Amino acid sequence: MTDTESEPAQPPAVALTGITKRFPGVVANSDVHLTVRAGEVHALCGENGAGKSTLMKILYGMQAPDEGTIEVGGEPVRFRSPAEAIKAGIGMVHQHFMLADNLTVLENVVLGAEGLHGIGRRAKARIRELAGATGLDVDPDTLVERLGVADRQRVEILKVLYRGARIVILDEPTAVLVPQEVDELFETLRSMRADGYTFLFISHKLDEVRTIADTVTVIRRGTTVGTVDPRTVSSRQLAEMMVGSELPSPEHRHTPIGDDEVLRVEGLTLRTQDDRTLLDSLDLVIRSGEVLGIAGVEGNGQTELVETIMGMRRAAEGRVLLAGKDLTKAGTLARREAGIGYIPEDRTRHGLLLTQPLWANRILGHQTRRPTARGAMLDIAGARRDTERIVEEFDVRTPGIEVAAASLSGGNQQKLVVGRELSGDPVLLIASHPTRGVDVGAQAAIWDQIRSARARGLAVLLVSADLDELIGLSDSILVMLRGRFVADADPTTVTPEDLGSAMTGAGSDRVDHIEEGETR
Amino acid sequence: KDSASSNNSSGGQNGAAGCQTVDKPPAASGQASTSEVATDVDASSLKVGLAFDIGGRGDASFNDSAAAGLDEAIAQLGVKKENTKELTATDQESEDSKQTRLRQLAREGHNPVISVGFAYSEATKVIAGEFPNTQFAVVDGFVEGAPENVTFLGFAEHEGSFLVGVIAALESESCTIGFVGGVNVPLIQKFQAGFEQGVKAVAPDATVNSRYITEAGDLTGFTDAPKGQVTAKGLIDQGADVVYHAAGASGKGVFAAAHEAGIKAIGVDSDQYNQPTVAEYKDVIISSMLKRVDVAVFDYIAAVAAGDLANLPQVFDLKVNGIGYSTSGDMLSDETVDWVEAYKQQIINGEITVSDTPTTS
Amino acid sequence: MSTADTGPGSSVMTMPAAPRRRTLPAWAIFLIGVVAVVGVLATTSYLTGKPALTSSLTMQNTVTLGVPILLAGLGGIWAERSGMINIGLEGMMVLGTWGAAWGGLHGGPWVAVLSGALFGALGGLLHAIATVTFGVNHIVSGVAINLLGMGVTKYLAVLIFEPLSQNPRDSPPIEQFETFSAQPLGDWLTDLENEQRVVISDVAGLLGGLVTRVSPMLIITILLVVGTYLVLWRSRFGLRLRSCGENPVAAESLGVNVYFHKYVAVVMSGALAGIGGAALVLGSSPSIYSEGQTANRGFIGLAAMIFGNWTPGGTLAGATLFGYADGLRLSAGPETVHALLYAAVISAGLLVIWQLWRRKWRTAMLAAVGAVVVYALYYASDELPTQFLPYTPHIITLVVLALAAQRLRPPAANGVPYRRGEGD
Amino acid sequence: MRSTLLAPTLAIAFSALLCALALLASGANPADALGVMIGHVGKGQVAVDIVNSTAIYMLAALAAAIGFQMNLLNIGIEGQYRIGALVAAIVGSALVLPPVLHWLVILVVASLAGALWALLPAILKVTRGVHEVLSTIMMNAIAFGLAAYLIRRDMFGILVGNNVSTEPIPDSGRVPGIDLGDRGTVFGLVFLAVVVAAVYGIVMKRTRFGFELKASGESPTAAAAGGVNAKKMVVVSLLVSGAVAGLVGMPEILGRDHAYTLNFAAGYGFAGIGIALLGRNHPVGIAFGSLLWAFLEKSKVALDNVGVPREIATIMQGSIVLSVVVAYEIVKRMDLAAEQRRVGRALGTAKPAEQVGGDGK
Ligand SMILES: Nc1ncnc2c1ncn2[C@@H]1O[C@H](COP(=O)(O)OP(=O)(O)OP(=O)(O)O)[C@@H](O)[C@H]1O
Ligand SMILES: Nc1ncnc2c1ncn2[C@@H]1O[C@H](COP(=O)(O)OP(=O)(O)OP(=O)(O)O)[C@@H](O)[C@H]1O
Ligand SMILES: [Mg+2]
Ligand SMILES: [Mg+2]
């Protein structure tokens, strides 16, 4: 607890006192206290749904607190909209990108701050000036839809800088970045800190927090648990503060890999309408009881690979065989019926019918199979019964199976999806970011389920941005870059840093336990 | 063979002087009989129900004309105003709404019940069956197998159109004449047919360009003045210097185009020279083809009151003055009127039969 | 906790698109398009001997019939660029016709335009209240507003106009705008047109139609087209408004008052549709409100907007197409519309060349087949059945869409419900 | 449950209030007007007419609802039912078949024609991404053209008085109704609407097809991941919607008119869209919505009969749709909040007090 360090002479950059925020049925923040010194990087940690984002949105004027006071630079303030927070020098980079794809970089940046330099030539000049600080190197007239993830992140930071914010909120900025990109970001933060900027930094990755933060505040169940000095605590201690109990981790437990070839992909090639190659002649094989991990920076073709194997995209060339059966021409449903389970990377978009009850969600993807269907008719009783089973087995915390999927918290939604996809005895599970955005408890439960299914002979294709998860679960790892497999790593020896290098194409010559090439 | 005509315009010469015309027919002889229905009957005991088509009283078109007939009956036949009732159709209504409307009128004791517009034909047939003691009439209507107590008040629009066709041929300098129809349906084709025949009767070499604003089923052709104007402008651009319209409210646009181009126009249904909405353009309205819905309605009421429907004309045509043409504004020369009267007599005498379907299309 | 998570905020990122080759600026494409269209029409006019295809009268008719459609389409742009679908344009336009007649009775044509705008805006306001404040499905609200617009207008016409005009369906005539012509220029163009020289006369005809008997309404409309472009694409306010249609949550996070901009957009949309109604009233002679006079022009305006890819220039092109084809049919007659088939053949021929040049063999083949089929149709017939002619623009629209719809780009959050503070 | 009844009740009350104000403004007594509207139902054949119209609106609304289930807005119902009715009338009149078979053939032809008219928009949507609103608006217009063309006298039309009609369908093709004597005749095909509604209800609730349709409507992305072929669903749902739309004209044509005429009613398509939304795409909701709509539609005649502006009924239709959806929206928000509260309580997340223990300040 490092309160004593703050000098009485300089008022804190931000002081939140007694903040309470209630949503229908949920208290997101309850009597939160937070003090941020000027010129520091102040990290905020806590499990999913702890209320971090809500607290930041309150500080940023997007939501009004039910109780409590906010002081900025010693002055009590009351923001009714982000506009007022911006005026007070606060900027925020959101957990999800807040960019309009069909507008240019210039337009995205100046939006809402047109008063500063107009929307024309002066604004463009100013953006060019600031772009250097963020490492953004694109023409301001480029449409944002043409930018990659890292560049989008830079545009987000540029937006904050452009407004002249001195206090910058970064809500999980590193979730989508690879280690090298994280390092670049931290470089930027450090130099800006030297220029006097104050940062509020949210992350689930505790080692990152310890690298960059000057102070860490931990939030649990909507309230502050404590403020600590990152140099004096370990990641494990931090985690235990967050969860209030021991932290599980993805350790590698070997089970024997079977001989049966479950999935074989040969020469898989995918092109866009305008003939760009998204997947370039990919080959892979997964045997029963094997977990094959795919590592890669987001946007290098993992999504496309998974969706092509699932039949949601049409391959230009190549074959997909499941247990020897050629599925290349089959539709998604036929592939599912042949025994593929699919945990999509974005459960709300690809996994769930949010307004439908849980049992209806159980039917999705199983609408032709027992126990949820009989011929052309649905078996609603069967679907209900099996949903009860999933709720039981996978510990989905819900008041019942009649509630809409939207009412469940993210972790419980994900457990429902995992339970559904492991139903009907699949031979292959395609899991994209199976634990993204879910809290630690749910994460552990999902890992356990995947492990035990594998022990029963399930083959798994695992795509994850969480390198620890990838290393912990996989029997072997392929690294994807620009639509190709560029490296093959052994999870028993590889480190996240090595993987990160390979993922950015930087480290091909640095590591000995990464084998070059498009083997397998 | 060419017969010279007066100073007016219809000379026997080609070119800008006007159309080459046929011989002027012999002067009119004989008289048009007015309808034989007595007008001295007492209709004060009648309760008259009137069911209008879309638009209703005040539409400056045939509904209004029917209303005028009723007003006339009130004034002359002693029908009591409080004993009359007028109902109006709505857009896009279904057949049963028409039936309900008629049934309502009949049930409330109205007798006769007069409906306006051919769309009422079928409904009237049905309701007349339900109320055998009530007299029904349908302006413009006709349907097979209607009961005894239904009278169809049909008009020979083509005959009147023939006469204004004669006027157009005589008045045209360019010998090119235009016709604008509202919606391409048989009723309006009657106007076109008679008009074209009338022009050709006088000037076989004349050109008549006919256009419709919309096709069958799309009734907006009767309510789209801008399109009426565009259509007329096109005809004028192709040389027409007399245009005749049968396009309802779209006709306003036709007059506007004629006014703008300084050419002549012929109105339809009622005497449009005296119509307030087009008063601005009255100087170009040299005549109107009169369709005397008012006469038909009046005569019908009188006939019901007198109890002799048998004497009511089968068709309201030139002979019974159910159809005619107007000379308001005195823009027709005596010579022209002579020609028209002569043709009128020939039609009445049966020497000329006017076709009710156009030869083209 | 938004339930419909198809909004832009949650879009999954996949591989970024390749940087596009540098394309021509919008105005250049527009100009090239105009030149191409005029070229095709001039050629057709020459080869088929149908001067009406490019006569000044045709142009005038295009303007008369196109302006109300264009104004409705502009209204559509305003609403949809802010993310609000407005299928109620027709109803707002009807309100505008009543308002214009009523205002015009009391204060002349300028007041008519203002009052038309005001009444249309009231319709827009109702739409905004239902959709923005209450989050009602945009289409439902639009359908309801169409019903209300017609019901209220008829009701008011009976209440207010009938005593004056003795006609429940018409208002009394109102004063019209004085028209004016750019005289020396107009005469010169008329002379040129009459010389019937290839291309020159065609261009002169089309231009002549634009400068003779110009109504201030046309000037107002052109100003509104340019104004819409400048406001929506060149002003701060427009940027904010468009951002609400692309990603309202992002706009909100930058301090943009999304509700406010949506309200302004939808009300403005109604006002423009209302001005469209006023243009209809003032463009009629005599200038009156007359029941049923909009005749689905609001829907056509919506179509012109989609046709025009939600841009003012494109919508102008769409409205011109509708006005041109309808005007040509009404004023020049079926034979001239028939000549448009010839224009279609020429266009298809050009498309073949263009696709061959781009080495798109398949598309070129298809276009060639199309050209042959249309030419056969042209050759085999003298006239098309008149029953189909009124629908020429509709058929052209379908064909053009079938060819180019993939290039259309609706605002990303168009029609997506938005609630303040519910994005993530 | 609460939401299903509360919302419409609130909404109808609210729009009744609005209309009462409008009535007061025009000097009429709202209570009397309402009395007239309700009293009207008991008169003559109005009750039966309402039932008949309800069936027609139900078919149109079901057609719309099928599209809505997967977020497709089939504005083209208007054109689809016109083409369906016309083609069925033409084919039906040309065939000689035993009664029941004859009806079935006509119904199938009507569905096929309706579906065919929806085919082009469906194909354009899945192959070229053309928005169905735009393409169906175009197809509606073109349907008028095709109808006008097919009913030309040199095609399939015959002249009846001033009206054009197709050849009448022979007796074997006419579906007998339930004759209630003075009360009128309930169309036999009212039961068709009931059957279609029941099938629709079962398919949506109980079958794989319905599930896939709803899933694609709610989340195309999730449906695709769940193995639903979105393109196929678009084509199938538009075609089925068009097929049901093709039936809309059948109760009238087979039960009363026995031919397609120029008077064929328009506007059912747009009404259907409003009703489907009013009934929340639920078959029972649609039935009640149709009943309400038919009641309002029929009361126009009654209002006119007592001199109340009948536009009130149109205003009422508009304001009911608007207020019903607003009310639904409000009640939905209340329900959602209540459900969140319930979930919150059940999971204990709403009890932060036990967790408070932080000391950070
Ligand atoms: N607009 C809202 N309406 C209702 N509940 C909400 C809303 N926003 C957040 N919540 C709830 O408030 C709680 C805190 O959410 P918040 O987004 O602040 O969590 P977080 O700590 O940022 O979690 P994560 O690590 O997943 O980002 C959660 O239970 C969430 O479901
Ligand atoms: N090799 C191919 N395999 C499958 N489909 C193709 C192929 N090439 C083109 N297509 C499809 O054919 C259609 C026309 O292709 P093309 O890209 O040549 O058209 P275009 O000139 O770009 O025209 P537009 O983009 O306006 O439709 C497109 O739908 C495209 O997806
Ligand atoms: Mg968060
Ligand atoms: Mg292409």
Image: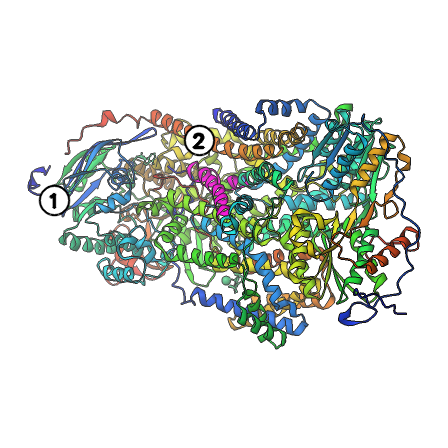
Q: Which residues are magenta?
A: C114-143
**Does residue B178 sit above or below D262 in this rendering?**
below
Instruction: Out of A165 and D215, give the one closest to the viewer.
Output: A165
- Estimate the spatial distance between the alpha carbons at disc 1 and disc 2, rounded to whole Å: 52 Å
Instruction: Out of D114 and D326, give the one closest to the viewer.
Output: D326
Q: Residue sitting at 82 percent across and 47 percent down?
A: B323
Q: Secondary structure at mark 2?
A: helix
Along the horizontal axis of the image, is C314 left or right of B339?
left
Give the amino acid at mark 2.
Ile
Magenta part, dominant SS? helix
Q: Which residue is mark 2?
A: D330
Along the horizontal axis of the image, is A442 left or right of C231?
left
Instruction: Dividing the image into four quarters, tell me where ligand 3 lies.
Output: top left
Crowd band around label 1 with a 10 angstrom C-alpha radius: few (<14), some (14–19), many (20+): few
Task: Name the spot of residue C257 as percent of width and height, x first.
Answer: 34, 44
User: Dividing the image into 4 quarters, which one contains the N terminus of chain A?
Assistant: top left
Task: Name the spot of residue A139 as percent of width and height, x first.
Answer: 32, 63
User: Would you say residue C117 sits in the magenta stretch?
Assistant: yes
Task: Name the spot of residue D180 as percent of width and height, x first.
Answer: 76, 24
Q: Which residue is mark 1?
A: A231
Q: Secondary structure at mark 1?
A: loop
> Badge 1 sits on which subunit?
A
